[in-house]
Image (cartoon, grey):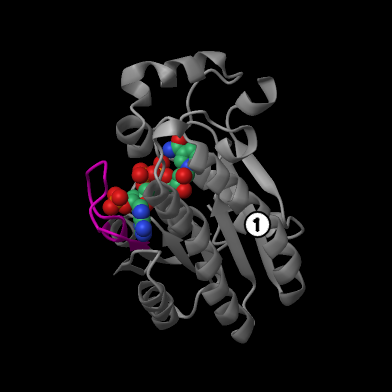
Amino acid sequence: MTDWLASDVAVVTGGASGNGREISCTLAEYGADVVVADLRMEPREGGQPTTELIESEYGQRAEFVECDVTDSEDLQRTFDAAETLGGVSILVNNAGITENRDFLDETEADFDRIIDINVKAPFFASQLAAERMIDADHDGRIVNIASISGIAGRGNGVVYSASKGALRLMTYALSASLGPRGIRVNDVSPGVIETSMTRNDLEMFDSGAAEEYATTTPIGRVGTPNDVANAVLYLVSPLAGFVNGETLVVDGGATNSW
Ligand code: NDP
């Protein structure tokens, strides 16, 4: 194991559960101190809070901030907490929500909520993080968690697909804006990953949709949060020093075989 991230402080939004929890733990495993920003400290899937796990398993400092990413004051408090640990150098915009509704049933409220959390919040979180990374002359890295739904589209998630496509394009534009200022910006676009989102919100495991994905995917299984976390680790590590404005698709080969 290396200490690639020993001088880093990472902010992970939605870090209490699912992909964000695994991303937080993986960054800590490689030496980062972590601020977990989420609505609630308790993981959706149960178990120890992420911050306790980080402190006990990896011996890194970890702070939980109760944060709704759509609330600008909550975001400010999140980056203030990172300041007490030495200042943010890694931001993972992971918090996101989905919907499982037919296009004709979607409301304006659904649209606004999904766009606020999946697009607007990463925009303003990135702005707050970038200001601080530039002021502190940190080697900054921002990773947005998009989705293959933002590449290929998903019928029962039109707004979700639009939001993730927007997040991906925002990644590319941000990489052009922030690269010259010492910050690399990339996205990870996962396929189906087993989390509460796919298990409970989308009911993919009860409906057979997850099994169908597994059998029609070249690698022959759904993904795990660890698959996503390892991709994030690569993008924030020194191995990816020349990787900027890129999408790392983590889907077992699904998208390219459709
Ligand atoms: P989960 O629902 O398991 O976890 C999401 C976490 O984000 C939860 O802790 C949730 O809190 C939190 N969250 C939701 N809204 C907000 C908010 N407004 N402010 C702060 N935190 C919030 O989802 P996943 O781990 O599966 O998803 C994480 C990311 O990965 C998302 O961006 C998702 O779109 C993306 N993704 C997931 C895929 C999958 O197959 N699972 C595939 C592709 C992309 P709470 O529990 O309180 O609601």
Task: Specify whether residue 213 is painted magenta.
Answer: no
In the visual, does 153 lie left or right of 212? right
Q: Report which quarter residue 11 is drawn in.
A: bottom left
- Residue 81: image location, x then y, percent: 37, 77
Q: Count numbered badges in the picture.
A: 1
Is residue 42 found inside the magenta-colored segment of the image?
Answer: yes
**Residue at the spot x=56%, y=44% of the render?**
162
Crowd around label 1: few <14 · some 14–19 · many ≥20 (10 Å):
many
Q: Is residue 243 above or below residue 9?
A: above
Which residue is painted at 39% across and 82% down in the image? 84
Tell me, yes or no, if residue 29 can be seen here.
no
Q: Is residue 212 left or right of residue 252?
A: left
The three-letter amino acid code for the residue at tag 1 is: Thr
Residue at the spot of label 1: 171
Residue appearing at x 58%, y 21% in the figure: 219
Query: Going 63% across and 32% down the picture, which residue do you hit?
Result: 152
| Residue 4: % across, % down | 58, 61
| Magenta stretch prevailing secondary structure | loop
Give, as a single range, the part of the protein colored magenta. Answer: 37-52
User: Image quarter for residue 79?
Assistant: bottom left
- Residue 124 seen: yes
